[in-house]
Image: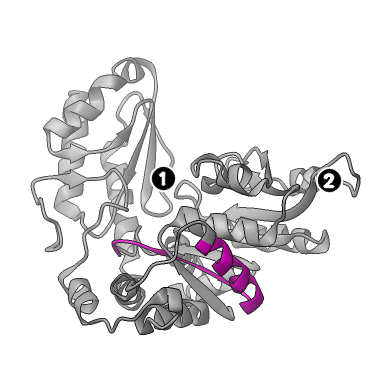
């Protein structure tokens, strides 16, 4: 475990949101110059917004408390009442964000099934676009997520899907909560660097949401990037959603530190996820694909499935935290090291007497 962990006796694999700020990040937070961001005069927030917009190739960015609010502001900035957005069944902004766009914005989702690699079939996207007829909601937006369940969307597909959306007159939004995990994985494929690939992916979209409190290890916050006009609309929606913060520069400083120091190290998390998968290989009743980034999803079958309710409590007794029932999710992050992964492997194998 790293020095930032408050409880070195626990291996917490529930999510990459559980990280604690490192000592260097805490120092950056304490040193941050502050203002009032509602008046747009917090220098640390302004600097972060300029940094992330510049990194991803956009004109402007908006710092928000959560990724949920970032996606919410994006959808409502692209769409009006009576419009709809095309999205995957397992996309976070559709399934796990409380239906906010529909509940508060009267924007209808049009969910599509995913292909095995996490993509939405191009033909299905095109078929879902409604004709210009008063019987239908107006299709305005395609929303993709990268990574999705830890899977990297193939870049050729991202280009094709977003080009299709553009040809059909749709805006394009990326839920890039784990964009930099995607960028690190894509850089490994292409022999480039993560920052180049993050900008390459973002360049396919009109707006991008990035989360700082997952693999990047900041305690709070996301950013929404887009054109100046788009961000001005999003700023108004953030205000209506109660997302205006005052001396939020301490949080922005943590995010800025993460961008400077925690992107390339995501490759370590990916290696640890693969180490976990290798350690569980061959166990009867456990089915999973080799992880591409920092998430390992494990399906329980047969006798293992019948004992599933016992597994998470068993792991907790062994000092390993995980989530799920018939499908378990293990997330690696900066507060987990090789010893922690090996401990998790031992705890899981002991449950199955392997």
The location of residue 317, given as percent across then percent down, is: 12, 31
Residue 271: image quadrant is bottom left
Instruction: Tell us which disc is closer to us: 2 or 1.
Output: 2
Residue at image x 33%, y 50%? 274
Q: Which residues are magenta?
A: 218-239
Query: 174 or 235: nearer the eye?
Result: 235
In the rendered view, tell whether residue 292 sits above or below residue 223: above
Q: Which residue is mark 2?
A: 130
| Left or right: 67 as drawn, with respect to 256 | right
Disc 1, SS: loop
| Left or right: 273 as drawn, with respect to 202 | left
| Left or right: 240 as drawn, with respect to 150 | right
In the rendered view, tell whether residue 143 sits above or below residue 286: below
The location of residue 247, given as percent across then percent down, is: 32, 73
The location of residue 119, given as percent across then percent down, is: 62, 48
Q: Which residue is mark 1?
A: 290
On the question of residue 12 being in view, the answer is yes
Q: Residues within 10 Å of mark 2 (few under 14, many from 20)?
A: some
In the rendered view, tell whether residue 283 sits above or below residue 272: above
Q: Earlier in the sequence, mark 2 or mark 1?
A: 2
The location of residue 333, given as percent across then percent down, is: 28, 56
Query: 311 or 347: nearer the eye?
Result: 311
């Amino acid at each position: 475990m790293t020095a930032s962990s408050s409880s070195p006796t626990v291996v917490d694999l529930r999510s990459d949101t559980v990280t604690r700020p490192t000592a260097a990040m805490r120092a950056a937070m304490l040193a941050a110059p502050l203002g009032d961001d509602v008046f747009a005069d917090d220098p640390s927030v302004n600097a972060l917004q300029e940094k992330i917009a510049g990194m991803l190739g956009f004109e402007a960015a908006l710092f928000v408390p959560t990724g949920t609010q970032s996606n919410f502001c994006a959808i409502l900035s692209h769409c009006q009442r009576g419009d709809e957005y095309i999205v995957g069944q397992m996309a976070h902004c559709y399934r796990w964000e409380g239906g906010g766009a529909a509940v508060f914005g009267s924007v209808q989702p049009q969910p599509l099934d995913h292909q095995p690699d996490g993509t939405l079939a191009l033909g299905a996207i095109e078929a879902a676009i409604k004709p210009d007829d008063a019987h239908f909601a107006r299709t305005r937006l395609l929303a993709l997520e990268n990574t999705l369940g830890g899977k990297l969307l193939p870049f050729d597909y991202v280009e094709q899907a977003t080009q299709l959306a553009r040809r059909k007159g749709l805006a394009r939004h990326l839920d890039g909560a784990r964009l930099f995990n995607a960028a690190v994985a894509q850089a490994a494929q292409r022999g480039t660097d993560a920052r180049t690939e993050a900008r390459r992916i973002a360049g396919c979209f009109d707006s991008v949401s990035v989360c700082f409190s997952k693999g990047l290890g900041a305690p709070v916050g996301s950013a929404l990037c887009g054109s100046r006009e788009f961000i001005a609309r999003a700023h108004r929606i953030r205000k209506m959603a109660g997302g205006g913060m005052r001396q939020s520069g301490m949080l922005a400083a943590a995010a800025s530190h993460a961008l400077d120091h925690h992107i390339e190290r995501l490759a370590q998390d990916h290696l640890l996820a693969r180490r976990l998968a290798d350690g569980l290989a061959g166990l009867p009743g456990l089915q999973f694909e080799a992880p591409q980034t920092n998430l390992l999803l494990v399906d329980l079958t047969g006798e293992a499935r019948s004992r599933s309710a016992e597994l998470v409590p068993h792991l907790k007794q062994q000092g390993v935290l995980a989530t799920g029932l018939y499908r378990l999710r293990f997330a690696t992050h900066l507060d987990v090291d090789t010893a922690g992964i090996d401990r998790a492997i031992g705890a899981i194998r002991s449950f199955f007497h392997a």
